[in-house]
Amino acid sequence: MILSWLQRRRREKILATPFPSEWVPYLDKNIAHYRYLTDAEKARLRDDLRIFVAEKSWEGCGGLTMTDEMKVTIAAQAMLLVLGLAHNYFDRVLSILVYPGAYRAVTPDSSTGHLEPQDSSDRLGEAHYRGPVILAWSEVLEEGKHPERGHNLVYHEFSHQLDMLDGIVNGTPPLESAGEQQRWHDVMTREYDALIRASEHHHATLLDKYGTTNEAEFFAVATECFFDKPTQMEHRHPQLYALLREYYKQDPASRVARKF
Ligand SMILES: [Zn+2]
């Protein structure tokens, strides 16, 4: 990846200062997964999230005033997702819009240009192609603290951004080799079909049934499960777990099993 000298210098300048000590409790309190990281992983995450916080435009919506706690909590989870990958801080995502809680989706009115609420139901988050990520803060905070519930809006929306890196939203992010592509196709197709069958028969599933919506949502839902319920996923969906471990280059199941 080619960085402009200006961007490189800005990043070096950010990292030349010590990590803000008042941000540490946000990581300890709000990101349950943080405690499972090694010291080296924690150091990388802290560096990555500082750059992410600095480079995004943060907008509070629906009366919300952005705080450092919100920025750090969101940035930490976005950067945790790609901790094992070479990345450029989701450089296509220029802004993060944050609502206090569930919100009504808005679209620009074609005649006036004003943002008009849509008729659709309340939303918790969205990821737009080469556009903003929109998040409900109440969800982000609860889910970071309680991974055992198996939902994580930040992982979900940013996995859509990974999916979009090749320009197609189809549940397949750019992969490294033809072999990985083949494995991805085989395993994802099998698991997706199995979730649809289980859903049709009203069977209980580890993966959220929202994943049956389409392949893109399946990848996002599987990602949430991979980081939030890795031990159960490795046990119940070993091939899917192995596939995501290969892709994300992280092994959350062995991470959470490590003794401290
Ligand atoms: Zn989604």
Image: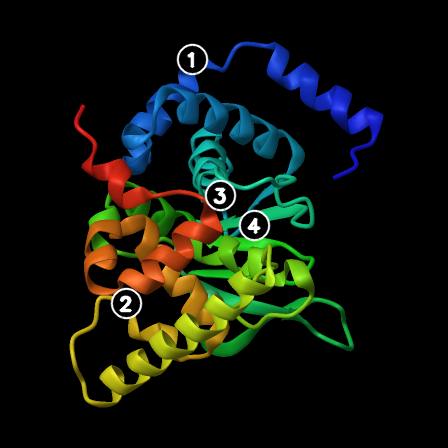
Q: CA distance from mark 1 to mark 3?
A: 20 Å
Residue at image position (23%, 45%) is 146
Which residue is labeled 3 in the image?
78
- On residue 21, the disc is 1
| Label 4 crowd (10 A; few <14 / some 14-19 / many >=20) | many
What's the residue type where badge 2 is placed? Leu
How many numbered discs sit on the rendered protein?
Answer: 4
The answer to whether mark 4 is within 8 Å of ligand 1 is: no
- On residue 97, the disc is 4
Foreground of the two, 222 or 84: 84
What's the residue type where badge 1 is placed? Ser
Q: Mark 3: which secondary structure?
A: helix
Q: Hey, which residue is sitting farthest right in the picture? A: 5
Residue at image position (30%, 78%) is 195
Residue at image position (78%, 33%) is 3
Which residue is labeled 2 in the image?
207
Residue 218 at x, y = what percent?
41, 70
- Residue 260 is at least partly visible in this image: yes
Circle nearer the N terminus (1, 4): 1
Q: Mark 2: which secondary structure?
A: loop
Indicate the quadrant where residue 86 lies: top right
1 or 4: mark nearer the eye: 1
Screen quadrant of the N terminus: top right
Q: Is residue 148 left or right of residue 152?
A: left
Foreground of the two, 150 or 136: 150
Q: CA distance from mark 3 to mark 2?
A: 21 Å
Q: CA distance from mark 2 to mark 4?
A: 27 Å
2 or 4: mark nearer the eye: 2
| Label 3 crowd (10 A; few <14 / some 14-19 / many >=20) | many
Q: Is residue 127 above or below residue 168?
A: above
1 or 3: mark nearer the eye: 3
What's the residue type where badge 4 is placed? Leu
